[in-house]
Image (spheres, helix red, strand yellow):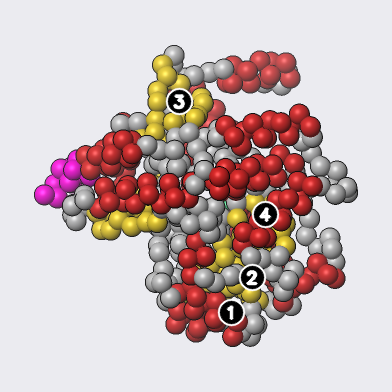
Amino acid sequence: MTNPKEILKETYKILNSDDPEYISSIYYEHINPNLTKVIKLAGYAKIEHSAKDHIILAKNNGKTEEYIDCLGLYGAVLLGHNNEYVLNKVKEQMDKQCMPTKVFLSSLYAAAAYLLANLSGLDYVFFANSGAEAIEGAIKIALASTGKNKILSTYNSYHGKTLGALAVTGREIYKKNLPEILNVSFAKYGEIQDIENKIDHQTAAVIIEPIQGEGGIIIPPPDYIPKVRELCDKYNCLLIIDEVQTGLGRTGILFEHQRYNIKPDILVLAKALGGGIVPVGAIVANQKAWKIFQENPLFHTSTFGGNPLALIACISTIEFIIQNNIIDQVREKGQYFLNKLLSINKPEVVKEIRGRGLMIGIELQEDHYAASIFSSLIKNNIITAYTLNQPKVIRIEPPYTITYEQIEFVASKIQEAIDQTVELFELA
Ligand SMILES: Cc1ncc(COP(=O)(O)O)c(C=O)c1O
């Protein structure tokens, strides 16, 4: 089709369609054929229509279906979909100014930077538009500020899929056919000895998640993060803590690393920072990490990063979290959920259930049990997914708005799905 008016007509037909087969065919032709197959196979070929808190409404040929969101956009939607407080603040800002000049001062930028610097005990803030972009900036700033050339990361880590973020991600499958663009080595997560073996005086930074999220909700031993901090001090390198997924209360504390009474040199945030309304990423850092900006104030910039909509979303998200004791609620609901799941006693299928706050992982004995469990859950209108690096681990990351009754319902359906898996694979 080449006539622009005809193309537009078809575009609106797609936009107004509630037929999953038709939308799948467009996905197949214009987005990603194999991904479309996976979506269909997983039973996720539904058309999302609207969302409120932890409930997603999907349309299917005239019918409306209701789903409980236990995925929360891979941990990003902590406050629930369309949180009214943040949404209204963003709408008010929209009427005033959406895009910045980037040459005048912005009281929004100043306020958001003040807030993050003070909550983290660090000094400086740079706003980006996503997790990977913030990671990318953090690595670049660390290399330039230290003048060293090596980065130490961990196996099984996940830091995003742009080239730099991917270079420090500990999963080979996403790097196929790509050249090595950074000097990165990897240590075993949770094993301090391996960090000690691989760190040296040319190491610019160690980058680490305080809980490996996409790696399968892996919680390190209690002395691990403090010891990584000590080693960074010993070798005069920067500690970059990636709290893109754990930050802002997801694990029942504002920043997961604060559990250990240590401070990173660079803290990276995204996901929950925009309140589920506007994408926002942030690099928060101390003086040492910011050295390069003394030489060149324009060393790192972004046209859209720190736009007024993102900034008001960030400020009002943090305000909402603080004023409504969201973190206490996350901790209590998370513990309740975890306890319910821990009562599932099916060692043939489940290897371990673990988590902090509303970041819970169910590790299965075998990868292929996951499909049977997802298919049963989606039939019961519950959305979950596995962790990106570890298909054996089902993640439970609902918004904090999920009720105790719904937690009980979801836990009972997970139990049912596991029982069915035992039967299906004749494991009893
Ligand atoms: C720990 C961590 N870092 C970085 C990222 C990348 O964030 P984004 O998907 O916004 O680029 C993710 C995404 O899941 C993450 O979990």
Q: Is residue 129 left or right of residue 200?
A: right
Graded by Cα atoms within 10 Å as few (under 14), some (14 to 19) or many (20 or more), the crowding at tag 3 reads: some
**Foreground residue among 86 and 267:** 86
Tell me the residue that label 3 is attached to: 57
Q: Which mark is residue 265?
A: 2
Which of marks 4 and 1 precedes in the sequence? 4
Q: On the rendered image, what quadrant is the N terminus found in?
A: top right
Tell me the mark number nearer the camera, choosing from 1 and 4: 4
Which amino acid type is shown beneath numbered disc 4?
A: Leu
**Foreground residue among 156 and 249:** 249
In the image, what residue occupies the spot 78% across and 60% down? 300
Q: How far is mark 1 from mark 2, CA to CA?
A: 10 Å
Q: Which mark is residue 115?
A: 4
Name the spot of residue 128 as percent of width and height, x first: 69, 51
Which amino acid type is shown beneath numbered disc 1?
A: Cys
Tell me the residue that label 1 is attached to: 232
- Local SS, label 4: helix
Name the spot of residue 385 as percent of width and height, x first: 40, 44
